[in-house]
Image: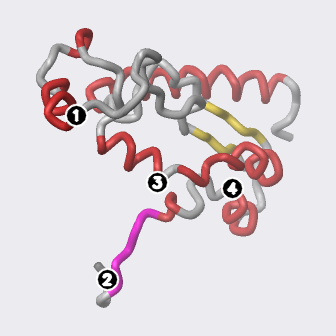
Amino acid sequence: MENGDLLVDGGLLNNVPADIMMEMIKGKIIAVNVSPEVDLTVASHICECPPALQLIGERFKAQAARTNIPGLFSLLMRASMINIGGVEDKLREHADLCLHVPLKQFRLTDYNAIEQIVDTGYSYAKQEIEKWISKGSIC
């Protein structure tokens, strides 16, 4: 809240603001997209939504024994990212280098894996930027 206004993350409307950066700076722009490449999925044997009590029971099972059904939080998070569909085209138009970090081994809510996610992103970005520099694209 600020002066009676409710402020929300701008990522809901423009999650990779390369266009805004292009207006603000004169240098090179590197845009990084960490959005999932694959939408939420459900186990192939599930044809309809299980009863509520079964879904609640799933949360108490060991991770490996759970049925692959996204939880409410995952669904809400993914719904808030719905405008990501055209992000790649937008990035190519406004950024000098576009990175799409390969994070498909992680779920949207894998908060306990934050160090692995950061390491994956850092390694990928370092490798891609080195390739970009070696091509002379940074001049």
Whether 7 is among the magenta residues is: yes
Tell me if 58 is positioned left or right of 81 in this view: left
- Residue identifier under label 4: 18
**Residue where numbered disc 1 is placed:** 51
The residue positioned 69% from the left and 44% from the top of the image is 30
First in residue order: circle 3 vs circle 4: 4
Mark pair 2, 3: CA separation: 22 Å
Residue at the disc numbered 3: 80
Residue 129's place in the image compared with 8, above or below, is: above
Q: Which mark is residue 2?
A: 2
Three-letter code for the amino acid on which mark 2 is drawn: Glu
What amino acid is found at the position of numbered circle 1 in the picture? Pro
Colour option used: secondary structure
Residue 50 magenta-highlighted: no
Of circles 3 and 4, which is in front? 3
Q: Amino acid at mark 4?
A: Ala
Q: Residue furthest top?
A: 64
Instruction: Give the residue displayed 32% in from the left and 24% down from the top.
Output: 113
14 with respect to 28 (left or right) = left
Tell me the amino acid under the disc marked 3. Answer: Ser
Going from N to C along the chain, the mark reached first, 2 or 3, is: 2
Residue 72 locus on image (x, y percent): 30, 43
Q: From mark 3 to mark 4, how far is it between C-alphas? A: 19 Å
Q: Position of residue 37 (x, y in %)?
A: 60, 31
Give the mark toward the camera: 1 or 3. Answer: 1
80 is higher (above) or lower (below) than 23 = above
Residue 5: x %, y % from top left: 35, 85
